[in-house]
Image (cartoon, rainbow, N blue to C red):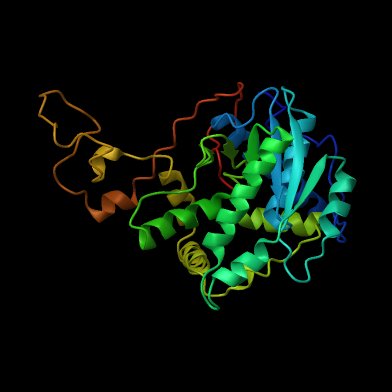
């Protein structure tokens, strides 16, 4: 086992995080487990998708929310014991929202010792001017933000752009695209940017939002609320998030199963002619275990057929896990 990217949950941390106000042994034990779980999830995502390579300069995008704080915090812990050298620079885009506490992130980042850059651009006024009251601001806001961050990545010489989206964000995006966009399309852990010049990574791809919320509370990150999209209560994303929470409440394990399904795609059993050669399909006379069984299985068969685990391939550096342990199961 390579202990540098991946942590053994039973091993003591080299640099344990400060305890919360409740310093009881039980809380200390729980927070220790939580930190190791977050490190394990991030380390596994980095390996599975070859997110970070030797010599990379990773631009960590900081919004002031719990997820970006957690991403930087855990990534710094992994960097300290990684088997390769890479650099980190933290970047915040100050969009000039009224009342934005512009001192908070610089003061926090100064305590981490990581180099950082604050980019000042008044995208708030543009969004408020272009978007009618009550309409969703996310699309325009994200386009403006994306273009600015690409430019900043060029200026800083960053080879990777790290975003703080987690497992729940990725599932929500999948359902949003299916419900409202007519596409089976998600939020990939790694992709090339739309301008073709940058590699975007999501190191929290396997992390669970509730874990990140607990970690943010434990670490007492100075959270900065968003007064644009974060203040809109009827967003479709919030509705989908509520739907997923309700499903998980009624059927524990369903969210994990759906997330696993995103890693087990069978194009021949969908209907996209661009992804599978249906027009040229011919009977071969050769048995194929992945072939159609001609009749739909009974509901009972589905109920007792757990999703197959995704094929794992350590593309960055070798790693092993405890036998039988799922890659991204929340322990």
Q: Quadrant of residue 202?
A: top right
In terms of depth relative to the viewer, which is nearer, 293 or 135?
135
In terms of depth relative to the viewer, which is nearer, 287 or 282?
282
Residue at image point 62% right, 41% down:
203
Residue 241 location in percent, x, y? Answer: 51, 64
Q: Is residue 164 visible?
A: no
In terms of depth relative to the viewer, which is nearer, 241 or 148?
148
Residue 254 location in percent, x, y? Answer: 45, 56
User: Which quadrant is home to the N terminus?
Assistant: top right
Q: Is residue 112 left or right of residue 137?
A: right
Q: Is residue 264 left or right of residue 325?
A: left
Residue at image point 82% right, 65% down:
101
Residue at image point 33% right, 52% down:
303
Q: Examine the rendered structure and indicate whether residue 23 appears above or below residue 75.
A: below
Q: Quadrant of residue 104?
A: bottom right
Residue at image point 43% right, 51% down:
258
In terms of depth relative to the viewer, which is nearer, 96 or 317?
96
Residue 191 location in percent, x, y? Answer: 51, 38
Q: Is residue 72 left or right of residue 174?
A: right
Residue 119 location in percent, x, y? Answer: 75, 51
Q: Quadrant of residue 121?
A: bottom right
Q: Is residue 251 visible?
A: yes
How many discs appear?
0
């Amino acid at each position: 086992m390579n202990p540098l990217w991946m942590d053994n949950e039973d091993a003591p941390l080299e640099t344990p995080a400060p305890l919360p106000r409740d310093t009881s042994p039980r809380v200390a034990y729980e927070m220790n487990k939580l930190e190791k779980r977050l490190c394990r999830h991030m380390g596994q995502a980095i390996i599975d998708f070859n997110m970070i390579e030797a010599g990379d300069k990773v631009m960590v995008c900081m919004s002031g929310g719990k997820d970006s704080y957690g991403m930087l915090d855990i990534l710094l812990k992994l960097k300290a014991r990684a088997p390769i050298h890479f650099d980190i620079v933290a970047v915040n885009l100050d969009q000039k929202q009224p009342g934005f506490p512009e001192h908070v992130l610089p003061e926090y980042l100064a305590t981490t010792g990581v180099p950082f850059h604050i980019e000042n651009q008044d995208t708030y006024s543009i969004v408020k001017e272009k978007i009618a009251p009550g309409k969703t601001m996310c699309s325009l806001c994200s386009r403006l933000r994306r273009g600015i961050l690409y430019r900043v990545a060029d200026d800083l010489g960053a080879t990777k752009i790290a975003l703080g989206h987690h497992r729940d964000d990725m599932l929500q995006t999948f359902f949003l695209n299916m419900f409202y966009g007519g596409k089976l399309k998600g939020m990939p852990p790694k992709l090339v940017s739309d301008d073709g010049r940058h590699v975007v990574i999501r190191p929290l791809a396997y992390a669970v939002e509730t874990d990140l919320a607990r970690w943010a509370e434990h670490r007492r990150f100075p959270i900065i609320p968003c007064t644009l999209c974060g203040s809109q209560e009827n967003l479709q994303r919030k509705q989908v998030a509520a739907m997923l929470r309700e499903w998980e409440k009624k059927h524990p394990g369903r969210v994990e199963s759906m997330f696993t399904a995103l890693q087990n795609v069978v194009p021949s059993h969908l209907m996209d002619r661009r992804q599978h050669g249906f027009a040229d399909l011919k009977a071969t006379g050769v048995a194929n275990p992945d072939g159609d069984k001609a009749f739909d299985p009974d509901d009972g068969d589905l109920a007792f057929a757990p999703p197959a685990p995704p094929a794992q391939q350590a593309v960055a550096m070798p790693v092993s896990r405890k036998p039988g342990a799922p890659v991204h199961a929340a322990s």
